[in-house]
Image (tube, helix red, strand yellow):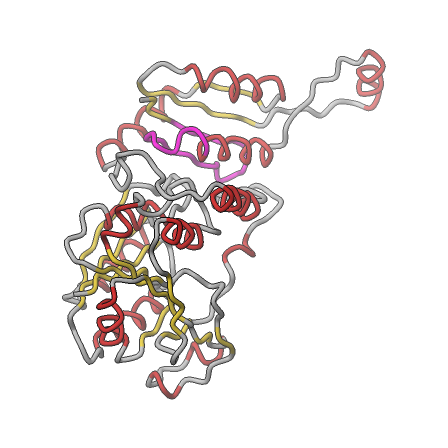
Amino acid sequence: MISIIYPYRNRDIQRIKKSLESLQLQSNMAFEVFFVNYGSDENHTQNVEILLENFSFVNYSYLYTKLQPWNKSKALNSVLKTLKSDYFFVADVDMIFDSNFIETALQLSKNKEVWYFQVGFLSQEETEFEKNFEDYTIKFKSNNEATGLTLCPVEAARTINGFDEFYHFWGSEDTDFHVRLKNSGYKVNFYDDRILMLHQCHKIYRSKETKFLTQDLQISGIVQFNHQYLKKAIQENKTVVNNDDWGEVIQGKDHFNQLAAYASGNSKQISNKRVDIDYLLYQELPNLKKGFHAFEIKESDNKVSLKKAIKARIKKNKNEFYSLKSVNDKLLFHFINFYRNHSYNYSVSEDLKSIKFAINKL
């Protein structure tokens, strides 16, 4: 039995449908699917839940992380921690599977080693077609640097505490997983005998990163930051990561609602002055008492007349402000590094003039 894990958030329903339909056509049906909805919005959630009713082999779960950054590692670990099968496969909703994928995976799993797979990438035009697997025209193929689609013994993954939950947004968590498996003595193989998966074309999600504040949670430079963390893991021959509670879902529905309710009426107001933000980051947050806390950072009106600006510069007493984009990046970096194991929510207002967050300090 192969357990296939799909981590998901706010993606095109048609892609999921194609992917799951290709699993319905497998020559060997000795598999199960765990579909993890990592905090999608209400519209996507409703649509995907309706779709999944058509596939009896799917086990569905929703994690209340809508107001947190994307974390593929946590999504995967939420299944991996208690998985009963011997082997699991990390899937992607963009994959269309060859009808013999499961049969091949079962054969490969007999050696108790780790495998990852070469993928054929489709053009946008080919992606729009409904074809048999063998009839698609491949635009290009992945190489051994693309490590995301991994078949792995469950016990091997548990030995190293699963995927490193430090990684947020995108970049490096899959390669990190392979590095630590190798450091633990497991053989990691690249399968390129033939193409068993096709990748449906879509816009690269990293390209959505902007230099401006948006309601979609982003951090400028996160890919480079994650890569730096990966380099350190390689240098230190890292194996085991995460706390003992890895894979456990900290924030359930009740906790999510409690945070939202507390934030709606108890938010402390803070300006985007440099001194206020620096104090919040380096003094106030680290020293919070246990329990619920909520904050709202509002953009200050720091416009002054030319005459006052010249006068302030002369007197060297001009107030300095961070842009809300800069505040956003600083705050999210802090949550990733220091508060990722706490229950919290984080949002940017529709008019992009304020940032709200609430945290349950443990």
Tag count? 0
Q: Quadrant of residue 259?
A: top left
Give the camera-side residue of 56 and 83: 83
**Residue 170, percent across and down?**
47, 50
Q: Is residue 175 above or below residue 255?
A: below
In the picture provided, is 339 more to the left or to the right than 300? left
Q: Quadrant of residue 69?
A: top left
In the picture provided, is 184 more to the left or to the right than 124? left
Give the camera-side residue of 101 and 327: 101
Question: The magenta stretch spans which residues?
Answer: 337-358
Give the residue at x 30% y 27%.
261
User: Could you tell me which quadrant the N terminus lies in?
Assistant: bottom left
Q: Is residue 353 magenta?
A: yes
Give the camera-side residue of 221 and 147: 147
Q: Is residue 32 magenta?
A: no
Q: Is residue 35 above or below residue 290?
A: below
Q: Is residue 94 above or below residue 164?
A: below
User: Could you tell me which quadrant the C terminus lies in?
Assistant: top left
**Residue 168, percent across and down?**
44, 44
**Residue 193, percent across and down?**
38, 79
Give the residue at x 26% y 80%.
99
Give the residue at x 39% y 51%.
177
**Residue 79, percent across and down?**
23, 50
Give the camera-side residue of 225 and 203: 225
**Residue farthest to the bottom?**
135
Give the residue at x 63% y 28%.
322
